[in-house]
Image (cartoon, grey):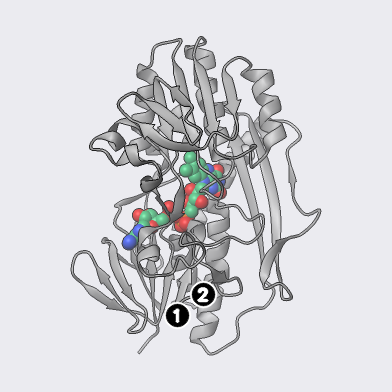
Amino acid sequence: ARPHVVVIGGGYGGATAARYVRLWSENRIDVTLIEPNASFISCPLSNLVLGGSKRIGELTMSINALADRHGVRIVRDTVASIDADQRMLALAGGQSLRYDRLIVSPGVDFMWDQLPGMLKPGAQDRILHAWKAGAQTVALRAQLEAMPDGGVYAMTIPPAPYRCPPGPYERASQVAFYFSRHKPQSKVLILDANDDIVSKGPLFKKIWKERYNGIIDYRPSFRAADIDAGARTAISELGDQVRADVLNVIPPQRAGAVAVRAGLANANGRWCAVDFLTFESTQANNIHVLGDAIAVAPLMPKSAHMANQHAKVCAAAVIDLLNGRPPYAQPMLTNTCYSFVSDHDVIHVASVHAYSAQQKTLLVVPGAGGVSSAPSALEGDYAMNWARNIWADTLG
Ligand code: FAD
């Protein structure tokens, strides 16, 4: 029989892996992709919906080309459980599937238990995260539009690591951009659990001073311990209370629930450790984990660009392993994260990560990356082209 690879999750990591296993095996491997959502909605660029310069429809795409052009079998369902010994998985809809190799790319899930007030009935309808693009993004934009001028938008940022290190600061810039044009008396309050901005920090601070002075107030070391959803109040572990007109809570994160339930989250019970030559789990044979769900290598961001790169290393390794060949021993990955600080001005941070056989991990290549010196519209063009390219590369 032909080898069968099953992929969990049709997001940036999983869709890319499904496509490349088909392409690079010249269609000699059968690939099944399990994804509950009818369409792919991009988190990258979704902060622009909050800023008002993009609509969610512009970030919403079909995954059907993976089936039509590449012969990936797409099953619209959710994986309920994984049986690593039997190499079987069970779908919520009742079907079971057997695999030779399994690729798991479920993204992140939220640790609501760390913010007990968010578990109360209705709390999650009132206080939004918008950290998975879609209905929440649109609803948060509506809250910002409904807020009177002179109001306060506050965002809580969880301790690193979390999905998209520069994402919250891009979001703050987008909301400040909107306020500066339409509600100039309003404020953006950033309540950051970290002691400083984890990505492009000096640059963001300089831009906020130049463009959004008096609008953005950055408060580091504010570790949200609870949320009073009714009062739209964030409560820090020191007992400080901050009330907002629009409160946006980005919760603490861990690997997607399906990976945690399968026992793959062996790093602090939160993230899935992998062998960086193959992205095979260190916990279970024949199961590979990609994207945001993994325990990252040093200085590796949880980004769509990185998930795409993991997927390609993994796809090549899975094909080699199914053909009895050793995987390539010197993988090298790249990453660029663009951040929009207005509707068209952009900054970036880039890095290159090479495998170290000695340390058995991916390490940043010194001098190979960098950060913008200032925002520019030219980088805005690069950012849009980055998005078009990665969508085409992911969805085929
Ligand atoms: P996802 O893309 O989230 O895909 C996971 C998929 O798995 C989902 O489709 C989900 O439905 C599915 N799934 C989950 N559980 C199951 C199950 N049990 N069964 C079946 N399917 C399941 N990255 C960048 O590189 N550049 C950016 O500019 C950027 N901007 C961002 C802005 C924001 C506001 C946010 C929130 C993120 C941003 N990111 C950016 C980060 C990027 O979105 C993530 O790193 C990327 O989506 C990770 O890919 P993934 O495959 O791990 O997860």
Determine which quarter of the picture holds residue 1.
bottom left
Type of amino acid at the residue the image marks with label 1: Asn
Which residue does the image show at 63% across and 38% down from the upper left?
195
Name the foreground residue: 373 vs 249: 249
Q: Which residue is mark 1?
A: 286
Label 2 lies in ligand 1 vicinity (Cβ under 8 Å): no
Residue sticking out furthest to the front? 238
Tag 2, which secondary structure?
A: strand
Verify CB contact (< 8 Å) between mark 2 and mark 1: yes
Name the foreground residue: 33 vs 204: 204
Which residue does the image show at 52% across and 14% down from the upper left?
181
Residue 280 badge: 2
Residue sticking out furthest to the right? 367
Dot 2, how many residues are within 10 Å of its Cα: few (below 14), some (14-19), or many (20+)?
Answer: many
Quadrant (top left, top right, bottom left, bottom right) of the C terminus: bottom left
Picture coordinates of residue 28, whole percent (x, y): 43, 81
Tag 1, which secondary structure?
A: loop
Picture coordinates of residue 247, whole percent (x, y): 41, 27
